[in-house]
Image (spheres, rainbow, N blue to C red):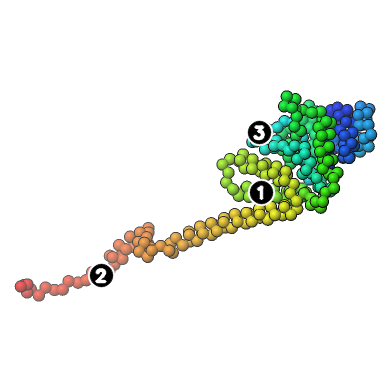
Amino acid sequence: MIYVIMLEPVTSGNVGAVARVMRNFGFTKLVLINPHCDHRGAEARNRAKHAQKILEEAEVTDFFVVDDYDYLIATTAKLGTDYNIPRSPLKPDEFARKIRGIDPSKKIGLVIGRETHGLFNEEIAKCDFIVTIPSDPQYPTLNISHSVAILLYELHKEISDTDITKHITPIGKPEKDQILRMFDQIFDSMQWETPEKKETQKVLWKKTIGKAMLTRREAYGVMGFLRKVIRMKTSVKSKKTTKAKKSQKGSIKNMPLAKTIHQSFSAPGAKKGAAEAKKSTPKPRKKPSTGKAKR
């Protein structure tokens, strides 16, 4: 199920226009986060035309609860470089192909930014990936309702067709979170030059797993591989610890005999004990002289 999520809308006409294009392409779930306008006022209703029911049933909330959705897709006209992982985008047709055939029970949120400054970096970071509409670089920002119309049109083209692979659907949030937890376990067992590099890897794999929209079979395959990596690292660590203990325990036992004897006599008090033993040993008596001269 696709949810169109508008963050802090300030113009009721835009809300009405978004409701209208949703109705045009068969989408009905509208969510308004902390709206600053009356989404049921005259301007919104006039722009919505035959989408009055969408306005009436719109979900209004003060806070954006990201955990309520299996996937969150951010929309933005501001792109980053190759090094800006959170702002690495998909085009509308690429996004639509990923959504095609998805299980209706999965909740997918299409997040629409504010009319003034769009989405903040922290909000984009909470989404799985972003989608952007190619436009003229001289004036790339579209009106909100126009952007929604293009995105929903591409989605409608894909999901309205008969799909023979409809039974093969992407995983949901529980499986996705389990994969990311396993990645975190591996990252935490590694040494990193800086904490920032470790966090960059976590963000990169979060976005990669989100974009992949793995099927259940693919997800279990990835989890199986990660489980082997975790076991291997645990086994290597255990062997190193055991080897170190054995080496420490056998350091005296395996020492050559001559070296052991030398060390035992070189130990504190050994020389003193040897001297006392020498004093206590009786000296041999000299034989009496016969007085005969040697020839």
Using the image as rendered, state which of residue 257 and residue 277 is in the foreground: 257
Q: Label 1 neighbourhood size at 10 Å, few (<14), some (14-19), many (20+)?
A: many
- Lower sequence index among marks 1 and 3: 3
Instruction: Tell me where residue 290 appears, x and y as whole percent.
Output: 9, 75
Using the image as rendered, state which of residue 269 and residue 188 is in the foreground: 188
Q: Secondary structure at mark 3?
A: loop
Identify the residue at image location x=68%, y=56%. 224
Using the image, tell me which numbered label, if any, was put on residue 81. 3
Q: Label 3 neighbourhood size at 10 Å, few (<14), some (14-19), many (20+)?
A: few
- Residue type at mark 3 is Thr
Instruction: Tell me where residue 23 appears, x and y as whole percent.
Output: 90, 37
Q: Label 2 neighbourhood size at 10 Å, few (<14), some (14-19), many (20+)?
A: few
Q: Which residue is mark 1?
A: 183
Identify the residue at image location x=66%, y=49%. 183
Relative horizontal placement of residue 137, taking residue 152 as reference (left or right)? left
Q: Quadrant of residue 121?
A: top right
Q: Which residue is mark 2?
A: 282
